[in-house]
Image: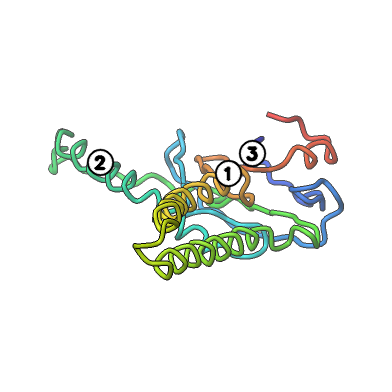
Amino acid sequence: MPELTLHRLRPIASPPMVCMYCGRPAAHADERWVPNPRDPKGKDTGGGADVPAVSGDDPVSAAVGLVLLPFVVWEAVAAVARYARTPKANPEVATKPPPPLDPPHTKVVITACDRHRHFSRRFVWAGLGGLVLVGLLWAVALRVGVDSPAFGPLLGLALVASIAGPIVLSLWYCLAGPVIVDRVTQDTAVLDRVRLPYFDATGIPVP
């Protein structure tokens, strides 16, 4: 999806009140101040710095984080290995701390209409619905018993739903989830998942 870049040194005094999902007039604005790192190359803030549209989506982020846990562990092991190979700096050389950024934060405003104000809730309801469906499949499979000819297909369906359900929900959330702060650099904050109708309505060039 297109990205919207906000600049620390060129802030927008009055962001357009246009829904970032459908391009219609927005009725709600969620204002946040994102701290800028000193690294000019920036960093990927990932799920921990997600800024959902108007309402929080902590349950969804937790579910996505659980599915992606093996990748997080692998990144942690790789980071430890890189740190072990990094040459240690001379402690006798005193380093002067750099001056603080001015201003140190970037203002982020995520706008939404009444329909998309709680956009992230649909993922919560989808997760709860999938959980209930998987529970029913397991309950029916255990109720029919091992001697029933329907036990095998029901058990296989329950296993597939238990594995594929969280993966499908995670992919759906990553590809079509709420607007988030995806990357933060020294001078910019990048919003991801901003829909094309927003750029058409505001006249902002699509990156």
The secondary structure type at the circle numbered 2 is: helix
Q: Quadrant of the C terminus?
A: top right
Q: Which residue is mark 3?
A: 5
Of mark 1 and mark 3, the one earlier in the sequence is 3
In the rendered view, does 100 fall on the left or right side of 6?
A: left
**Residue toward you, 156 or 10:** 156
Looking at the rendered structure, the kind of residue marked 2 is Ala
Q: Which mark is residue 67?
A: none
Looking at the rendered structure, the kind of residue marked 3 is Thr
Q: Which residue is mark 1?
A: 189
- Residue at (22% x, 43% y) in the render: 77
Of mark 2 and mark 3, the one earlier in the sequence is 3
Q: Which mark is residue 79?
A: 2
Marks 1/3 in contact by CB < 8 Å: the verdict is yes
Mark 2 and mark 1: span between their CA atoms?
25 Å
Of mark 2 and mark 1, the one earlier in the sequence is 2
- Residue at (44% x, 52% y) in the render: 153
Q: Position of residue 1 (x, y in %)?
A: 64, 36
For residue 9, what is the image quadrant?
top right
